[in-house]
Amino acid sequence: MAKRDYYKILDLARTVSEADIKKAYRRLAMKFHPDRNPGDHEAEEKFKEAKEAYEVLSDTQKRAVYDQYGHAGVEASRNAGHAGGGMHGAEAFSDIFGDVFGDIFGGARRGGASQVFRGADLRYEIELDLAEAVFGHAVEIDVNKFVECEVCHGSGAAKGSSPVTCDTCGGSGQVRVSQGFFTLQQTCPHCRGAGRIVRNPCDHCLGQGRIRRSKKLSVKIPPGVDSGDRVRLTGEGEAGRNGGPPGDLYVEVRVREHAIFERDGVHLSCEVPISVATASLGGSVEVPTLDGHVVLKIPAETQSGRVFRLREKGVKSVRGNARGDLFCRVVVETPVNLSAEQRTLLRELDESLRRDGSRHAPRQKSFLEGVKRFFSGSPR
């Protein structure tokens, strides 16, 4: 049976680049690989066909022979042992297969040197009072983490010795495993990807190169932080392995609830109780702020629930210079623990207000009229 044109198999033009050849093969390999099409003989044949086309067209010398003489030239080169021999094709297929399916089978990526591992990032949570979060705060924390062994300096080897190159992987940290017609790259089971073996381990860290220690750190919390904000301390995470860099430490802020203020971003709010007399006649009341007390003027006939805005008495943003406002919601407080005389005075006041009709209580009048319309069935 005549073989199909390699360019048509990969659906490519003859002037295509090497990168496009690789890209086309990856697409077909993902589509027709036997592991993705179990029991599909046609898909298996197409996969083998695409593999053969890639082995030829990805090799510069083989491709030149194929372009000039076709399949006959390729077969002649194979029989004569020319055009780079058989190993190049196997290596090339192994490389492309590792790129496409390495994640599926858990194989390691290519690499000619021992693998280094960055240390893990750590998270530490602190609680702050509102004032500490608003104005900034310096806090000292204890972090329990892996640090570099001070005896072997991270090598894992005892004093006077050093790690040696792994005989199994030759220092690459990876080994090739043949499975049928393809080859996988996997982490070396002997050195576990390090590329080196510690034959005489350090007594202090038992060959790990790291030990667990508690370290005191001073953390400067910038002004204006809020719950959920994080402060990053570069390099204060766990120590890396095989010479890898350390991770980072993220200090996450939680702000405790305040007895007076509620926070919404850069704005603050609070309730301010006032007496019936102050609400009716007007007056002034002291209001606490983060900067100290201020005097809030209450106009006459102020209703309960009215909100007063004190500009720039809130929080300065951690990401800018803008400062929020303080919103004061006044609440008219009903007097309690009245004496007999006070009760008498209140009754006299109430009777006086009633004699003048409803003009002293417009909201009450509006409410009663609404109730009357509701029960009479009138829409307005």
Image (cartoon, rainbow, N blue to C red):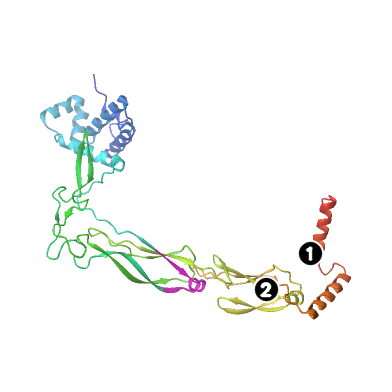
Q: Is 192 placed left or right of 326 in the picture? A: left
The residue wearing badge 2 is 273
Q: What residue sits 19% from the left and 42% below the top?
A: 176
Front-lying residue, 208 or 131? 208
Magenta segment range? Answer: 124-138
- In the rendered image, the vertical position of residue 144 relative to residue 9, given as above or below: below
Q: Tell me whether circle 1 and circle 2 mark residues in contact (CB < 8 Å).
A: no
Front-lying residue, 205 or 98? 205
The residue wearing badge 1 is 363
Mark with earlier residue (1, 2): 2
Percent position of residue 196, x then y: 17, 54
Percent position of residue 178, x then y: 20, 37
**Residue 319 shows in this picture:** no
Q: Distance between the residues labelled 1 and 2?
A: 20 Å
Q: Is 54 placed left or right of 372 in the picture? A: left
Q: Is residue 128 a member of the stretch shown in magenta?
A: yes
Q: What element carries label 2?
A: strand
Q: What element carries label 1?
A: helix
